[in-house]
Image: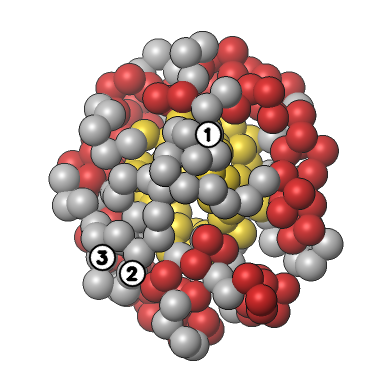
């Protein structure tokens, strides 16, 4: 059976003055998730959205929301994101000293649980918790800013994560975030990913629908 490719446009690169319009455009053009990058200015050197943005987008579209918490102490906000309507909540392994407890708490609040890994974090740190996960996010840029260049070493991590998922026997999404565009999508999918987070390649392209079609076509061509 042909693998399904999931698209998760990141609103970090959207025009905030046209956010409602642009979110609806990606939803109407096949977005599987709306990806919201949450930054606190501490875990990463930038500030962005919070759980209120999740609630606002839920009022605009029915597309499931994938919230990526690039923050310290994510546990204290899990309930807020659940109440706001997030479908998937992804935390960083590097920010969670008690990762198993954090993942359990996400599940207890009715959300799918994801764990993200920074470029310098090895995949093997997830071996003891993979049976609890619904999503693994491989960062192929250093988190904090959009529009960065793709770190090619991440391809080996994607492949390693895919092997770990296969060994687990679980249905786990393998998401990639950072430098995803129509040039990198094929290699990312070839190495085992199935979920593409793209920001500037979609919202900065000038033609959102065409950009989404181009990235999906590039990804599906290698299947």
Compared with residue 66, is residue 164 higher up or lower down, i.e. above or below?
A: above
Residue at point 67%, 46% (across, down): 50
Residue at point 76%, 29% (across, down): 79
Looking at the picture, tell me which residue is in the foreground, 5 or 92. 92
Mark-to-mark CA distance, 3 and 2: 5 Å
Looking at the picture, tell me which residue is in the foreground, 13 or 67. 13
Locate residue 144 relative to residue 141 in the image: left or right: right
| Residues at discs 3 and 2 in contact (Cβ within 8 Å) | yes
Q: Quadrant of residue 84?
A: top right
Tag 1 secondary structure: loop
Asked if residue 26 shows in the view, the reply is no
Compared with residue 57, is residue 88 higher up or lower down, i.e. above or below?
A: above
Tag 2 secondary structure: loop
* Residue at image mark 1: 71
In primary-sequence order, the first of circles 3 and 1 is 1
The number of numbered discs placed on residues in the rendered structure image is 3
Mark-to-mark CA distance, 3 and 1: 27 Å
Residue at point 69%, 35% (across, down): 111
Residue at point 24%, 60% (across, down): 149
In primary-sequence order, the first of circles 1 and 2 is 1
Q: Where is residue 18 drawn, in percent x and y?
A: 66, 78
Q: Quadrant of residue 213?
A: bottom left
């Amino acid at each position: 059976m042909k693998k399904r490719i999931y698209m998760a446009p990141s609103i970090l690169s959207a025009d905030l003055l046209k956010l409602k319009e642009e979110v609806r455009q990606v939803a109407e053009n096949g977005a599987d998730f709306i990806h919201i990058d949450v930054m606190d200015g501490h875990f990463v050197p930038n500030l962005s959205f919070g759980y209120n943005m999740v609630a606002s987008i839920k009022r605009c579209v029915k597309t499931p929301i994938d919230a990526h918490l690039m923050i310290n102490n994510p546990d204290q906000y899990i309930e807020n994101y659940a109440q706001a309507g997030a479908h998937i909540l992804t935390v960083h392994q590097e920010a969670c000293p008690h990762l198993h407890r954090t993942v359990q708490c996400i599940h207890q609040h009715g959300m799918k649980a994801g764990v993200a890994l920074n470029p310098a974090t090895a995949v093997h740190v997830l071996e003891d918790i993979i049976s609890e996960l619904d999503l693994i996010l491989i960062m192929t840029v250093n988190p904090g800013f959009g529009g960065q260049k793709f770190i090619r070493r991440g391809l080996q991590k994607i492949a390693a994560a895919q092997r770990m998922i296969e060994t687990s026997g679980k249905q786990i999404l393998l998401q990639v975030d950072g430098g995803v565009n129509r040039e990198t999508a094929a290699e990312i999918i070839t190495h085992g990913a199935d979920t593409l987070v793209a920001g500037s390649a979609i919202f900065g392209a000038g033609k959102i629908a065409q950009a989404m079609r181009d990235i999906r076509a590039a990804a599906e061509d290698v299947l």
